[in-house]
Amino acid sequence: MFWNKNQSDNDHTAEMRNHQVQTCCKHIRRKPMLYTTLMVIILIVIICMPIIIIKTRKTNDKQMFTTSLILHTESVYSEATFTTESTTIAEYSFKQWNNYCCGGNEEENENFQVKTPDDVIIDKFNKNALIICDYSGEKVVRWFLQDERNPEIIKSSIFCSGLALDKDGALYIIDTRNNQVIRIKQGEKNETIVAGRHGSGTDLNQLKASHYIYVDNDYSLYISDNNNNRVMKWTKGATQGILFADGSNKKILDEPHGLVMDHLGQLYIVDKNNHRILR
């Protein structure tokens, strides 16, 4: 009697389970798209959540330890703060001053001093050393940050106002006093005049107090010819430049300054007195 009762309960339980399964199957058959979509969403969440967590952690770590160089002249830019009175380049990390890495000291050796520097670039061909355009110091100097080496004078007796490196590591320097651009290849001391060389003037083979320079992957030079109020392009081996941006009408271009090119080959020009960036 007791056995029959247990058997009856078990049969009843099994019958209820079968009924639930059949009911669930009926619901699935009625709305297959809904349940399929739900399963896909659950699978996507399961797969994507670990990836999102890992990327978020990497981004946070990168932001925590990113450092940038700050150069003191006159204005404030995204990664650089400029003050005329200071002639030092400082490292900035995590919203506070760390230490001065160039200049700002009283060493007797003039190699350790910079005086109204005009430009700075990172030399990735020499362990990310800095190349500094020391205008009033009349020199271009390489400053080593990772090695305990004294600064190296690349070029002396020069009023330099702009620097650029090409993809092979050759250094291009704007020689403002002589209104020309010189090139010094990696590991060499000899220099080659690659633009200008015909004194101050407005002809296509002349420059006048140029300030900034950019070198593209074809070794063409783009020069902010400041006092001529134009941007000139000098192709490799050219004897004269091509008028790239004309500022004869100052409403179009008035005192071109900084230059940079994106991956599409579009040149961006700082149109200083019109308070804008041209492309």
Image: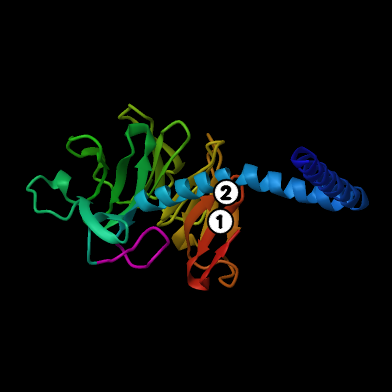
For the point 59% across and 45% down, which residue is it? 263
Residue that mark 2 sits on = 262
Compare residues 249 and 253 and report the one nearer the observer: 253
Compare residues 79 and 231 and report the one nearer the observer: 79
For the point 58% across and 62% down, which residue is it? 278
- Residue 71 position in % (x across, y down): 31, 57
Question: Residue 80 colored magenta?
Answer: yes
> In the orientation shown, which residue stands out farthest toward the left?
108
- Callout 1: SS: strand
For the point 31% across and 61% down, which residue is it? 95
- Disc 2, disc 1: CB below 8 Å? yes
The span shown in magenta is 72-84
> In the orientation shown, which residue stands out farthest toward the top?
187
Binning the other alpha carbons within 10 Å of mark 1 as few (below 14), some (14 to 19) or many (20 upward) gives some
What secondary structure is the magenta-colored segment mainly?
loop
> Which quarter of the image is occupied by the N terminus?
top right
Compare residues 144 and 195 and report the one nearer the observer: 144
Residue 136: tell me if it is visible: no
Q: Is residue 138 left or right of residue 194?
A: left
State which quadrant residue 76 falls in: bottom left
User: Total number of numbered labels?
Assistant: 2
Q: Amino acid at mark 1?
A: Tyr
> Which quarter of the image is occupied by the C terminus?
bottom right
Q: Amino acid at mark 2?
A: Asp
- Residue 11 position in % (x across, y down): 82, 42
Q: Earlier in the sequence, mark 2 or mark 1?
A: 2
Q: Is residue 260 left or right of residue 244?
A: left
Residue that mark 1 sits on = 268
- Residue 204 position in % (x across, y down): 54, 50
> In the picture shown, does residue 203 fall above or below 96?
above
Binning the other alpha carbons within 10 Å of mark 2 as few (below 14), some (14 to 19) or many (20 upward) gives few
Label 2 vs label 1: CA separation?
8 Å
